[in-house]
Amino acid sequence: MTAAAPAPKTNMGQPVPRYDAAAKVTGKATYASDMPLDNPAHAFLVTSAIAKGRIDRFELDDAKRVRGVIDIVTHENAPKLKESKLFSNGGYAGTTIQPLKSAEITHDGQIIAVVLAESYEAAREAANRVKVSYTAAAPSATFDSPGTTAAAAKGQNSQFKEDPKVGDFAKAFDAAEVKLSVSYETPTQHHNPMELFTTSCAWMGDNLVIYEGSQYVYGLKNGVAEQLGIDADKVRVVNPYVGGGFGSRGSMTPRTAIIAAIARRLNRPIKLVPTRDQGFTIATYRAETRHEIRLGASRDGKLVALRHEGAEVSSRPDAYCVGGTKTTTRLYACPNVDSLVSIVRADRNTPGFMRSPPEVPYLFALESALDELAVKLNMDPVELRRINDATRDPIDGKPYTSRSLMACFDEAAKAFGWSQRSPQPKSMSDGDWLIGYGCAATCYPTQMAPSAARVRLQRDGRTRVEIAGHEIGTGAYTVIAQTAAERLGVSLEKVAVFMGDSDLPPAPVAGGSNSTASTCSAVMMVCDQIRHRLFKALMPSDSLADKAKETVGISPAPSTQAAKGDRRLDIEKAFDALGVGVVEEYGEWKPEGAPLDSFRAMHNGQVRLVGGHQMKDQIAYAFGAEFVEIRVNRFTHEIRCPRLVGAFAAGRIMNPRTARSQLMGGLIWGMSSALLEATEIDERNARYVNDNLADYLVPVNADVPGVEVIMLSEQDDHINPVGAKGLGELANVGTNAAICNAIHHATGQRIRKLPVRLENIEL
Amino acid sequence: MRPFSYQRATDPGMAVQALGGAAAANEPLTKAAAQPLAGGTTLIDLMKLDVMRPTAIVDIGPLAHAWSAIAPGGDGLRLGALAKMSDVAAHAEIQRSYPVIADSLKLAASAQLRNMATLGGNVMQRTRCNYFRDVSYENCNKRNPGSGCAAMDGVNRMHAVLGTSDQCIATYPGDFAQALIALDAMVEITGKAGTRSMPFAQLHKAPGSTPDIETVLQPGELISAFSIQGRWPRSVYLKARDRQSYEFALSSAAIALDVQDGTIRDARVALGGVATVPWRAREAEALLKGQKFDDGLAQRVADAAFAEAKGRRHNSFKIALGKRVVARALQQAVTMEI
Ligand SMILES: Cc1cc2nc3c(=O)[nH]c(=O)nc-3n(C[C@H](O)[C@H](O)[C@H](O)COP(=O)(O)OP(=O)(O)OC[C@H]3O[C@@H](n4cnc5c(N)ncnc54)[C@H](O)[C@@H]3O)c2cc1C
Ligand code: SF4
């Protein structure tokens, strides 16, 4: 075992290497824009240089003279598309702002023309030569900009149903012995996955194939079909590998349907490769947020009152919001809780999911405030969390299915050396550097969604698993292959997994960290169907076979609900008894509590996530604790983060290698979010300014010399058949607060606005 | 990118001819139809962004056999314009005798870029001002003379506080040039009439009312070498930046001292990340000469270096930061072991 492949503890799978490792490091993994097309036209986008107003005129002559230009499509001659509703309103779209629909401009970088040419270079050159005259209006950029409107989220966003509250906050806060009232802010951020927002598509008669990096091939297939007004079964979306998503590819972006419609009219395949800066405006982003937190506590640290008010920016037409109060009001035991989320509308593109959408901004606020409270109480911040640790959700009174928050704190504290910390701010240093230690809790709801799968087993043990899941870099191929191998008792090398194709059985969106739990539960169930058939062939009666299924495993099955016995089934004998060469099963799995329309919705590309606080009698979250060391240079005020230590518990760890990689990436992302990442907005014109990877900073290796991931053993039999909690979005939640808390410890300065930069430090 | 012709220059005369031949009279170099290509790490970027639109590229790479010397000698140092940043940074004698040069290169860009990029291209790199690099903004005096300056009241955290004008506040982004200007380097220029040398300090031009004119070079002129008199073992390059590597300076200082028996005989102070051109703080240097070093002196020197600085909405912090960087770099230079 190595650092990258930690030895499995109880209730962990084997750290087998990635299924797709060799393909990826040898460049054989094919991403959407690698897919060969037959004589494609190349598309290049022209995007608006204003955020609000109208297009008066295009001057296209100069562009059309570029050799190789085929056509330039604008709102004046674009194919008409049908509307698609926002995903949260029962549609598929991440924004209802449609490109090339009219002369109206509603956000910076809106798609206003598509240039088609024989080569990428010609298309790009011609796009550079398109001249646009606008009548610009003064846009509202963000919070505090004139012209924005604000209103409560409840009532305008159909997925934000309730502002959680319990008890009497006002009274309890008034009477509290210790009070804290503080505000926090988080910036606009962009996902910037390495794979650009490309789309390739080809029509074969009435059938359309789309190659596009997507976190939801069924959603995209149905959404594009809806916009084109064709039968969804005529559309196929293919992407065996996705070059990072982080939420940006979860819902349909406006580019896909229009490119498909143009390809149909052109009667030729199209390949679109937008640029990095266009990616900032043609897909979604994490909107900026503001928070007001009020905490009341007794002198011995018990929370008696908690109020969290959040405000988020969205676009004019769409009421997107993340509403993280659903988590922050339930994390700690507190009898009097109040909350409110509101949405501020500005002249911006519609924001969308970005890795741990609700938890990142909202826990930054809460976990910073708790640290401030600990300072006020003169108490160790870990102890403050221990005092307020909850076994039940304080809002609805439901028990947590499992909760290892304090165990994580204790393990991480030990590994980090928290006991070496002298509590006084500004009391630790090393040469030019002030040193600060900080910590914070992290958590993420455990979610599942209906999923189908098809599994085929051959007499020689070769197995084929088909499921329209998504390999967004997380290790999905690997854990699905492991699940099938374990369940069927075949060796891992014999399992082939096919994903990223909407012609395969439907799987949910690769979002909300539900993929492993959902797809592996479905695969496990279908493998059990195969086992059942095999047993039945060897058993005299049905009821005996049912009994055998419960008591006899094909091999010692390791997972929680696995069969208990260890008698091996002879596959070859069973096949001979059945008299077949192949056994194939298809099945549809849904989590407990999934709504009645779940399977229909699943085929229609609509997700029915269950879990988190929305389970019937319980509440399910994964937890962790994060500790960081921060160094602040006395002279330059540069802020560096030499050490990040996180301990996490997330039910069954399917593969410690891929899980560690997710958690490590999360910690690094969290550090990046706290210290580097922010999309700068020019408030005069509501435009993004640093829309490239040289100016939108993400960490380089030298910024993260020490990252340690600890996975705790945890067993949870209440969540799903595989017993796994999603962990892809777990680790980047607590880091923002942990870093600001450490900066406070290093400098005595409390910074409540992200990202923290050297100019924010005053020594 | 727009179509261009590509030509490899196999000798300097050919390069000069290819570059100068096409030039219109009084055309600023940055707008010249023919542009030299060295490592390409600035030029190709700007062409892709449609900021630079040359119709002819003259690849001067083949001149490397003549123009890539790294030659420290008894009385000084000669560096060819086509020497790679990485080779110069890794050269043992440069590290020993000119640490400010080695460090300014080592702390710049990334390993991959340093392997491609040349010294000549490095000093000629253009500003990273986002409004300059994004042609969808009309108003940029550097790109479109007379159109205004979007950065002046826009997002200007990275912009300059020294050497600015009411036309342009774009930062000169490079690191190496600070080392050159501090060490009184000479730059050798090869043109139609052969080669000439001039102080490197005269190469770049402050924006004034013509921010599109960045250097005194004319179309058809190339930098062929840099030279420096003497050795400068007591020299440092201190760079403050948002991340630990691969990032431009928010503020940097190139310091070179000659200290004998505790007295500063000669002192050089140059500033990066804060000025529109490679910046020499001569008033600050004057305070050091003949003095014994202490922290109070460092503070006065730092104050003098930024006496004329003017901040805008997001970049005022660079004044206080720059002073602390200068003071700290001076301390480091004084105490370093040589
Ligand atoms: C992401 C990124 C980060 C960077 N970070 C830093 C940093 O931290 N510090 C830093 O200093 N630099 C940094 N750079 C800039 C980099 O150092 C320069 O791009 C590089 O040094 C340019 O050298 P080149 O040989 O590639 O020049 P080219 O791109 O070939 O040329 C640059 C310009 O100079 C002209 N030119 C080239 N050679 C000559 C010559 N001999 N005579 C006259 N004109 C010539 C070209 O026509 C062109 O206009 C960064 C660049 C990038 C892309
Ligand atoms: S600072 Fe200079 S380069 Fe930047 S927008 Fe203004 S004029 Fe252009």
Image: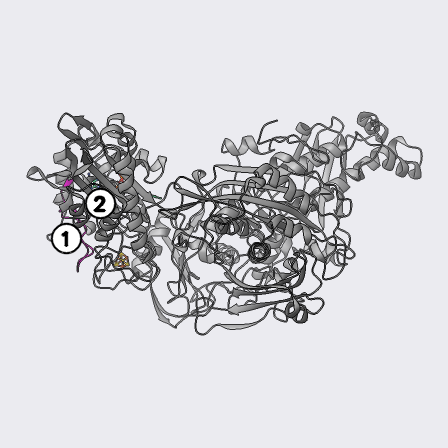
Q: Quadrant of residue A645?
A: top right
Q: In the displayed structure, does residue A724 sit left or right of residue A149?
A: right
| Figure quadrant, ligand 1 | top left
Q: Is A369 contained in the magenta span?
A: no
- State the CA–CA distance, disc 2 to disc 1: 31 Å
Work out whether residue A428 or residue A229 is closer to the camera in this orientation and state it: A428
User: How far across and down, in percent of the image, does residue B150 sit?
Assistant: 30, 62
User: Pointer 2: what residue?
Assistant: B270
Q: Residues within 10 Å of mark 2 (few under 14, many from 20)?
A: many
Q: Which residues are magenta?
A: B203-222
Question: Which secondary structure dominates the residues rendered in magenta?
Answer: loop
Give A213 or B315, whichever is nearer the viewer.
Answer: B315
Whole-percent x, y for residue A611 in the image: 71, 53
Name the residue carrying label 1.
B27
Reading the chain from its start, which is encountered first: label 2 or label 1?
1
Name the residue nearer the viewer: A217 or B78. Answer: B78
